[in-house]
Image (spheres, rainbow, N blue to C red):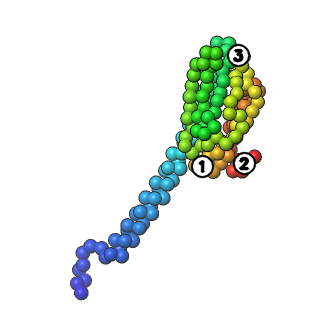
Amino acid sequence: MNQNRRGFTLYETLLVLVITLSLTVLVGTQSHRQYQRMAERAFWSTWQQMWTAGRQVAQQQRRPVAVKINRQTGELTLYQMAPYHELHRLTPPKSLKWRGGAYEWGISATGAAPALTVEWLSTANHLWWYQTFQLGGAIFYVGATSKRH
């Protein structure tokens, strides 16, 4: 046998490939989950801004604004009625699913809204998100829990 061999044996090559593949899968999975979590945080922030803008439009124009959640997609639409005029539309990230609570409600011409809770499920981190509107819609609270209420 030649003691001055060059290159890797089949076992060494397979070991390097398995380690490389494992690390790639681990890092790829983690980065995808991290992206989904960031997208969810951005959604809550954008939804907060959209809600506040809807209340301001209702107050400034002295016309009610309605909010609707599409039951299949979770897409949020803010609009005025009579005549219909869409103000904003927001699609949640794919990891966030609407699961219950109000799916349509209004903001009065004074900017007031009913107290209500909307339930969302995050498939990115397996948390239940509860979105609560209080004090006539002036307070918008979002909290997460690992168990469904």
Q: Is residue 15 left or right of residue 54?
A: left
- Residue type of the residue flagged with mark 2: Arg
The local secondary structure at tag 2 comes to: loop
The local crowd at label 2, few if under 14, some if 14 to 19, many if 20 or more residues have their Cα within 10 Å, is few
102 relative to 83, above or below = below
**Front-lying residue, 141 or 117:** 117
In this orientation, does residue 41 appear?
Answer: no
In this orientation, does residue 97 appear?
Answer: yes
Q: Is residue 13 left or right of residue 37?
A: left
Looking at the rendered structure, which numbered label has been put on residue 109?
Answer: 3
31 relative to 22, above or below = above
Q: Pointer 3 and pointer 1: residues touching (CB < 8 Å)?
A: no
**Residue annotated with mark 1:** 123
**Residue annotated with mark 2:** 148
Say whether disc 3 or disc 1 marks the residue closer to the N-terminus. 3
Total numbered circles = 3
Q: CA distance from mark 2 to mark 3?
A: 34 Å
Task: Give the image quarter of residue 22.
Answer: bottom left
Q: Pointer 2 and pointer 3: residues touching (CB < 8 Å)?
A: no
Q: Residue at x 75, y 27 (%)?
A: 114
Q: Residue at x 68, y 13 (%)?
A: 62
Q: CA distance from mark 3 to mark 1?
A: 36 Å
Say whether disc 2 or disc 3 marks the residue closer to the N-terminus. 3
Give the percent coordinates (x, y) of residue 119: 69, 40
148 relative to 58, above or below = below
- Residue type of the residue flagged with mark 3: Ala
